[in-house]
Amino acid sequence: MTVMEKTKWTIERLVEIGQDEAFELWKDLPAVDINELDGEYAGYVPTGTDEELRKRVDEIQFNESSVKGYWLGKAYKALSATKGEGYNHWRRLGRKVERSIQFTTEIRTSYIDGKPSLMMKYSPFNNRNAPSNLTDEIRKLDDGLYIGAATTKLPDDTRTVPNLFILTGPIGKWVGVDDEEAELK
């Protein structure tokens, strides 16, 4: 019996397991069907008992005063049976929600383990807020529960250690990115 078969997964449990266990789960999961993800999803980061990691994540990713704001999650829309697009959504001071850092989606071979993953690539949009070599890979844990692994390509063509995140939803409809021209001013 696998870990997935033994455990009824919840967001609370997934956040408690930490990065290493989330990565072990992710490696055994199937790719998400591109047409399954539709709308906005809530985002979380599994930090487990690693207090230092939790503090760093809270300061950078879950802080309305940080450069990007408080990360709320991601959004997805299929454009065809094989391709789609998406964006991240953030809450800023004053509870203003911003939708930016756009990406494309496509089922491809994982950079991490060579298995199928829903790949999220930021480079096609040349967004100044996301490195062009950043790629997220999403796999399905259960209905409405997904684990993502984010890596960045290094100058020697290797990739960074994956940073894991969790998505649940949908929690809302697709809205679309905010005006990119306003973001660049």
Image (cartoon, grey):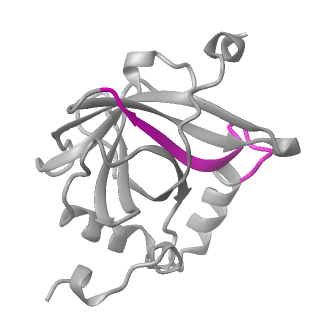
Q: Height in image: 183 above or below 119?
A: above
Q: Quadrant of residue 104?
A: top left
Residue depicted at 15% across the width and 52% down the height: 113
Magenta span contains residue 3? no
Q: Is residue 72 left or right of residue 106?
A: right
Q: Nearer the viewer, residue 70 or 55?
A: 70
Q: Nearer the viewer, residue 112 or 32?
A: 32
Q: Position of residue 153 (x, y in %)?
A: 31, 33
Q: Height in image: 176 above or below 136?
A: above
Q: Quadrant of the N terminus?
A: bottom left
Q: Quadrant of the C terminus?
A: top right
Q: Height in image: 131 above or below 48?
A: above
Q: Is residue 127 left or right of residue 133?
A: right
Q: Height in image: 89 above or below 26?
A: above
Residue depicted at 20% across the width and 42% down the height: 111
Q: Nearer the viewer, residue 145 or 17?
A: 145
Magenta span contains residue 78? yes
Count numbered badges in the picture. 0
Q: Which residues are magenta?
A: 63-79
Q: Position of residue 2 (x, y in %)?
A: 17, 83
Q: Position of residue 128 (x, y in %)?
A: 55, 19
Q: Position of residue 60 (x, y in %)?
A: 66, 49
Residue depicted at 57% across the width and 26% down the height: 129
Residue depicted at 18% across the width and 44% down the height: 110
